[in-house]
Amino acid sequence: MTVLATLTYNPYLILTFESYNERYEGSYPNLRFKADVRFRYTGNFKIQATNVVRLGGLSKTISRWDLNYIPDSGWYYLGQINEPMYCNRQLSFEWDASCQGWPNLSGKARLTTPKIEAPTYETKISDINSTSISIYGRLKTNPYNLYTLRIYSKATQKFIVDRLNGTHVVSGLKGLTNYEFHIEPFMADCSGSYLLQTVLKATTLEDYKKISVTSVDVTISHIDDKYDKAVCVAHTTDDAHVTKSHWDYDGMGSDLTSDNLTKEFKVQNGNEHRMLVYVTDTLGRTSDMFYFFIIASASYREVWVFDGNNWKKGKSLVLSSDGKTFEKCRLYCDTGLQWKGAKRYGED
């Protein structure tokens, strides 16, 4: 209950207006404040008159014929205050108040509404890349639909969103640049200043062109008569920004990965293997697939060896896919029927 006005005729006759059952109804833009209003005479008085009592647009006519002096007239119901709140958390109202008849009284009635609670909200940066930042935000509570959530960009010194409810992507940014955004609840009509504030900061990722695989180096080393080992190294247009490489071996879908670009696996002698490789960069992008072939070390080249008296024809095992590099070569001699390998070191 709130005392709206006290009109004094003398110490023995006082007219008091009071509001009760105060409440908000509706929501913005149709939010209203309502309250019931009553009045009474108090003191030590005797009224013998017909009075018209008014407060703002409310009025009531009463007739009294007091035979004796009394201290309290009891409450009279005057009516209901019904005022628009527009887009405000709190308003103060003032009305004319009067009593016409006897006693004749006039004055002002005043009321300040209860303050509507502030909203609650949540916000975060949900994604960052080289040219854009995603900002998530929503109002968790919004009493009487009275508030909105805005994004202010410190870089542009402007509000870039007035109704944030979900994810907004801020695009057109520069790579490797610091940005600051203020997430601020405002009144729904964006009037006044912010009620609360959360500062979000982020640095965009480095911007660079999409990476391509340009070539693959393959080195074959001999293990035994059945298996060889291949080491593959992929070269790209921007090795420094490669985070992972993906390899497919003979269509088997093998994902052979490591922190560097060196891959090791076994290949059977005499087989040609189709391979592909693609890479992922620091921005999460993947390159186009690069296809190449591996020919195992069971390929031979003719060699001649001088024994001190004669040149003898032999055959060496090629231990590199480029056909040019000869490592740990084993001599093969043609018996006329077949190529026969020389004894390995340590064999009888």
Image: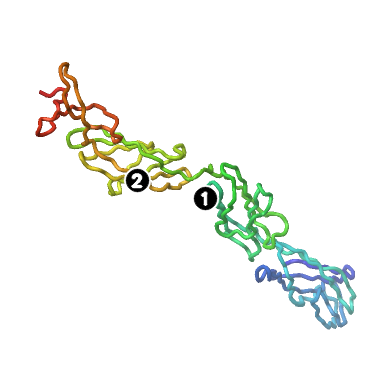
Height in image: 270 above or below 37? above
The quadrant in which residue 21 appears is bottom right
Image quadrant in which you'd find residue 184: bottom right
31 vs 242, left or right, is right
Q: In which quarter of the image is residue 242?
A: top left
Is 325 placed above or below 306 here?
Answer: below
Query: Is residue 59 found left or right of 315 in the rendered image?
Result: right
Residue 200, percent from left and from top: 59, 47
The x, y position of residue 52, in whole percent, is: 85, 80
The residue mark sitting in front, 1 or 2, is 2
Q: Identify the residue at horizontal 26%, vertical 27% (top origin).
A: 327
Q: What residue type is labelled 1?
A: Asp
- Give the mark nearest the N terminus, 1 or 2: 1
Which numbered tag is attached to residue 333?
Answer: none
Q: Among all residues in the image, which is located at the extreme front?
A: 310
Identify the residue shown where x is 13% and y is 30%: 334
140, 229: nearer the viewer? 229
Q: In which quarter of the image is the C terminus?
A: top left
- Which residue is under mark 1? 127
Q: Residues within 10 Å of mark 2 (few under 14, many from 20)?
A: some
Residue 245 position, x and y percent, is: 38, 42
Q: What amino acid is found at the position of numbered circle 2 in the picture? A: Tyr
- The quarter in which the N terminus is drawn is bottom right
Image mark for residue 291: 2
Q: Residue at x 76, y 74 (%)?
A: 38
Q: Where is residue 2 in the image (x, y as percent from the top left)?
A: 75, 66
193 or 134, which lies in front?
134
Name the one closer to the observer, 85 or 19.
85
- Secondary structure under the numbered disc 1 in the rendered image: strand
